[in-house]
Amino acid sequence: MAGDPGVGRILERLYERFHRPEFVHPDPIEFVRAAEPADRETCGLIASALALGRVEAILEAVGGVLAALGRPDAAARSMTRRELRRLFRGFRYRFFSDRQLAAFLFAVGECLRLHGSLQACFRSFLLPGEESVRPAMKRFVAELRSLAAEDIGILLSDPAKGSACKRLHLYLRWMVRRDAIDPGGWDVAPSMLLVPVDVHMLRVSRMLGFTRRRQPDLAASVEITRCLALYCPEDPVRYDFSMTRLGIHPALTYDDLRERT
C-alpha cells in the first residue's frame, strides 16, 4: 500500500527544511552528538532518561549529570553505588531523586560490566521474527531494573505496563539511525523502530491524518509509525526529527499542513 503523494511531498519538504544540524539546538541529542564514541550510548541513555519537562531545564539537568561523571561510560563502569550516591547527593529534577539517579547509574554500570556494552545487552534480547523493538525493549528495561536492585522511579519507563516509552524510543532512534542528525552505531534495523511521540509529533500527525488519538500514547506511536512506513518502510522514523522541528522552528505553518489533509 502506498502513501498519499501530497502527504509524501509535505514530509519531504519538512525533511529538506529541518533535517540539518543547525536545527538541533535545543535538544538533548546535543550531548550525544558531542560525546566521544565510547561514551555515546551511556550518554544517550542518561540524556533520554532525563528528557522530561521544558527543554531548557532538560539541558541543564543532563549537562549537570554528565559534567559530574566526566567520562560517563568509564564512570558508570567503575563507580560503586555508594560513590554514586555521594556524587549526586542533593540532586533533584522533576520526579527524580538523588537515590533514584544513583541507582539508575549503578544499573547502567552493572549492565556494562555484565554485557560489555548497552548495545550488546539490547541485542541479546532481540529475538528472530519480532517486527519491532518493543519486545526487546521490555526485556532491556527489566534487565536494568533488576540490576538496579532498588527504586529508579520512571527514569526508565516500563513497556510491560503499557507505557508509550517516548524517551526510550527516542534513545533507540539516536543509537540506531545514522545520518546528519542521529549518530547511530547500533546494529539494529531502523525498520524496527517506533516513533517517539511528543506533543509536536502528535499535533502534526493528527493534521496529516496519521492518527486521531488525542494523547501521545503507545497506540498513537504504533499508528503514526505504521503510516510513516508507507513513505519509508526501511526507516519510518526518518521523519521524526523534522516533524517535531515544525513546532520549534516553524517554516511551514500548521495551516499549510491542514490544507493537505
Image (tube, helix red, strand yellow):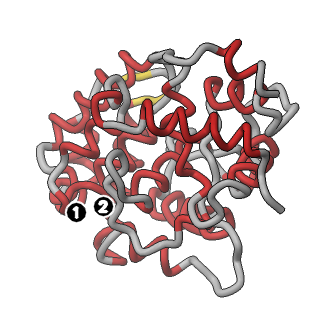
- Report the residue that reaches farthest toward the left: 70
Residue at (23% x, 28% y) in the render: 64
- Report the residue that reaches farthest toward the bottom: 128
> Is residue 41 left or right of 229 when viewed as pictured?
left
- Report the residue that reaches farthest toward the right: 212
SS for dot 2: helix
Task: Report x, y in % for residue 239.
Answer: 55, 44
Q: Nearer the viewer, residue 191 or 104?
A: 191
Up the image or down, 252 lies above or below 158; here it is above
The amino acid pointed to by label 1 is Arg
Which picture quadrant has residue 93? top left
Up the image or down, 135 lies above or below 213; here it is below
Label 2 crowding class (10 Å Cα cut-off): few <14, some 14-19, many 20+?
many
Which picture quadrant has residue 60? top left
> Is residue 41 left or right of 157 when viewed as pictured?
left
Task: Report x, y in % for residue 205.
Answer: 72, 33
Residue that carries the numbered disc 2 in the rendered image: 109
Residue at (26% x, 39% y) in the render: 31
Label 1 crowding class (10 Å Cα cut-off): few <14, some 14-19, many 20+?
some
Residue at (34% x, 43% y) in the render: 102
**Alpha carbon distance from label 2 to label 1:** 4 Å
If the image is split into quadrants, where does the C terminus sit?
top right
Q: Nearer the viewer, residue 261 or 191?
A: 261
Task: Report x, y in % for residue 249.
Answer: 45, 17
The amino acid pointed to by label 2 is Gly
Checking the image for residue 77, the label placed there is 1
Residue at (36% x, 77% y) in the render: 115
Disc nearer the start of the sequence (2/1): 1
Q: How many numbered circles does the render carry?
A: 2
SS for dot 1: helix
If the image is split into quadrants, where does the N terminus sit?
bottom right
Pointer 2 with pointer 1, Cβ within 8 A: yes
